[in-house]
Amino acid sequence: MINCKKITEKQLWGAIIIFHLLAVVFGLGFLHFDEHFQIIEFLNYKLGGIEAHFLPWEFQERIRPWFQPFILYCFALPLKSIGISSPFVLSGIFRLISSALGIASIYYFWRQFKDELTENRLSLLFWLGLLWFIPYLHARPSSESWSASFFLLGLSCFMGKRSNWGGVFFAFSFLCRYQMGFMIAPVYFWAVFRRWPWRAVIMSFIVLWSMIALGSLCDYWGYGEWSLAPWNYLKVNLIENKAAHFGVDPFYYYITRGFSRGYPPISLLIIVSSVYFWWKNPKHILTWVGLPFLVVHSLIGHKELRFILPFLVLTPYFIVYAFSHCSLLKANWIRRLCFGVNIILLIVASLKMANPAVGLYRFLAGTSIETLYVGGEDPYKMVGLPLRFYQKRAPKIVEHQKLTEIPFDQGKYIMTRHGPDLFPFLENPSCQLLYLTYPRFLLNFNIGNWIARSRVWGVFYCQHK
């Protein structure tokens, strides 16, 4: 909990905006391959930057929605028409749009639900906007981020008696990520259970399906033919079970993995406060939308933490409620510990790159390097697919199986990909370091031999052995 007597609402909003902007500026790249290949490269395809046969298999199967690439296209096309075509500028604008959407979702959700926690309104705002991973994930123009933000907007409108607008935003959420159906459907079940005015519920439901139907126009625009993408997604990933080919995890994955990757004590706080809230408030709307969503995702074989981001954006409410009502969490030292750890993690997360590879692409785009020698795979390829969006000013790549096979007696630009390959070049007086993924001084702190396990990319100019 924060000391509400020492901070104002305006100051909190200022901090939220600052950390979101930091995440936009420093969060270069993409968090997951899907964020890039199924959104940015889809957009790049419509902009004429990549051929269809280079797109991932999801394009051929017609299973991905085009709603999000279409929205980004509406921004990218006018920008390109006035000469703004740098992939690094465009991706920065996309992060800014995503972050603004996230801040809007925080504002409307907080305004709708703050009166339920009358004595802890500012604490709710703090955890909604400054829970350590929130600014970082809001800056990601990913399906998980946008679907979560649109859902919070939809829920806020629905609970605020603007049910038709709720239907619109729920549809947008679904069109970003089809799994949101497991969170949207319980809203309407809850409304029926609580005997809401049936006209408002039915009209909102009609608006929801009407907007989803209109979303098929985006799919037609993207695929160039009529396609029932939600059905294709269900058939390929669940009925044909193709999703399981990417790995299957036990049902308790989100608890164990969430505990370790969410960093205790914050991850433990999220788990305990969520269970406590569900137990104390089984009829609350946030229990109805959060618990089924998490249970369904736990039953699906293929699991990734990013899949439950729409659930995680609800947990700040659970945290504040538990701090106020759970006797186990009322000790001041627990609150101070969680607050302090959260601030440290927040600073680190808001200042980190999402994918260090894009930092290399930006460096190379700003140089006159024409040929780059690499040991191993082309750095402009990941999971076997080219990152054409970032290749507009890329040098020619010459691949060798091993760095030791590269002759550099006449002077060559050489790239290292892993920590163990880096040090021989750093120690070679004829090689000049031009680029490094991390600040060089960090190499002096090889605690736990993290360098050997990390993707530390370096670019050297070597003249002779």
Image: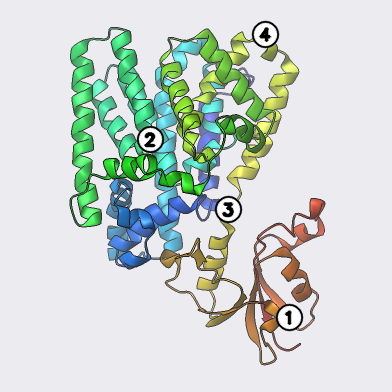
Q: Say if 371 sits above or below 435 in the image.
A: below
Q: Which residue is mark 3?
A: 353
**Residue 169 percent coordinates (x, y):** 30, 32
User: Is residue 128 among what the camera can see?
Assistant: yes
For the residues bearing labels 2 and 3, Cβ distance under 8 angstroms: no
First in sequence: mark 2 or mark 1? Answer: 2
For the residues bearing labels 4 and 2, Cβ distance under 8 angstroms: no
In the image, what residue occupies the spot 47% across and 44% down?
Answer: 244
**Residue 258 percent coordinates (x, y):** 60, 33
> From mark 2 to mark 1, how far is it between C-alphas?
51 Å
Question: For the N terminus, which image quadrant?
Answer: top right
First in sequence: mark 2 or mark 3? Answer: 2
Q: Residues within 10 Å of mark 3 (few under 14, many from 20)?
A: many
For the residues bearing labels 3 and 4, Cβ distance under 8 angstroms: no
In the image, what residue occupies the spot 20% across and 28% down?
Answer: 207
**Count of labels in the image:** 4
Q: Which residue is mark 2?
A: 179
Q: Residues within 10 Å of mark 1 (few under 14, many from 20)?
A: many
Q: Secondary structure at mark 4?
A: helix
First in sequence: mark 3 or mark 1? Answer: 3
Disc number at residue 327? 4
User: Is residue 83 among what the camera can see?
Assistant: no
